Amino acid sequence: MSFKMVTKYAHSPKDIEHYSTDQMREEFLMEKIFSSDDILLTYTYNDRMIFGGVTPVTKSLEIELGKELGVEFFLQRRELGFINIGGKGTVTIDGDKQSIEPHDGYYISMGTKHVVFESDDAKNPAKFYVVSTPAHKAYPSKKLSYKDAIAMPMGDQAHMNKRTIHKYIDASIMDTCQLQMGYTVLEPGNSWNTMPAHTHARRMETYLYTEFGSEDTRVSHFMGTPDNTKHIWLEPDQAVVNPSFSVHCGVGTTNYSFIWAMCGENQTYDDMDAVDMHELR
């Protein structure tokens, strides 16, 4: 097993005005999320979110962070959420082992000492996408089954953004300190997400783009200020950090899915500032 955590720094809108394509990718893109029997994480200074992939194949895996965060164990002052986008697996939380089906999620409380991930079948391993944010209070851990997630149909075919937003970690159904997390699925023949674009200066967000409609599908993620947008092209199972000042939108060459995670000042999902289409540059 190998463990790797890289650091991404926070930026001013002025910082990225003249970034090249390579600089944008270096600062905001996580190119590799899932690697067999590895843990690959990114620590962004944007609200100190940690996100990445845990991919147990032949081994059980546990995120063991302490000295890197100045604490005794990883979740001493953090909460964690995950969604499994691979095959069946299990998670053992302080000795309590539970089965995790494809697209199931979990919220894990601050103060949890051990979280161990495993796959049922090495030929079809689980792929746990994990997100952790700082916490101030221990709320109960909770399994979040895909079938029980809040499903919100959005968009329409005319605008090529017909999709369903599945809310897993949401303030309307459970308590967390600040983490929000969900999974959005675009229907075939649809390619835009979150258009018209918006910003939410009170929260930052990360996106994992996955489950592309074909092998040749690619997604372009748009970010930057409304009057000075940038873009990053993504392949399957790649993620981007989206700062609070940035627009949030993307388009694919076919349909795709993505996992979004947010943290910041509040947990109000629809607290966002829409950007007039005429303002986009």
Image (cartoon, rainbow, N blue to C red):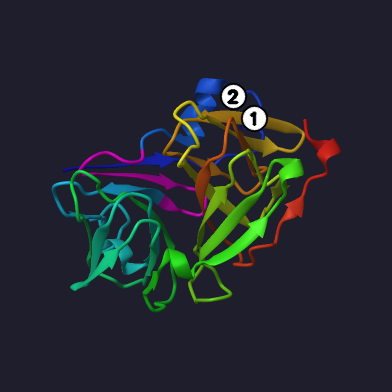
- Left or right position of 35 against 186: left
**Label 2 – label 1 distance at C-alpha:** 9 Å
Q: Quadrant where the C terminus lies?
A: top right
Identify the residue under disc 2. Answer: 19
Q: Residue 266: x and y, percent?
A: 61, 66
Farthest residue to the right: give it.
278
Q: Amino acid at mark 1?
A: Lys
Q: Element under label 1? A: strand
Q: Name which residue lies at 66% across and 33% down.
A: 14
Image height of 177 relative to 246, above or below: below
- Element class at badge 2: loop
Residue 271: quarter of image: bottom right
* Residue 265 placement, left or right of 112: right
Residue positioned 49% across, 28% down in the render:
25
Q: With respect to residue 175, does 79 lie above or below?
A: above
Of callouts 2 and 1, the N-terminal one: 2
Q: Is residue 65 above or below residue 280?
A: below
The residue shown at (47%, 70%) is 148
- Front residue of 178 and 222: 222
> Which residue corresponds to mark 1?
230
Query: Is-magenta flag for residue 44?
Result: yes
Q: In the drawing, does residue 142 fall left or right of residue 24?
A: left
13 or 164: nearer the eye?
Answer: 164
The N terminus lies in which quarter of the figure? Answer: top left
Give, as a single range, the part of the protein colored magenta.
33-50
Query: Do the numbered discs 2 and 1 sit on residues whose CB atoms are within 8 Å?
Result: yes
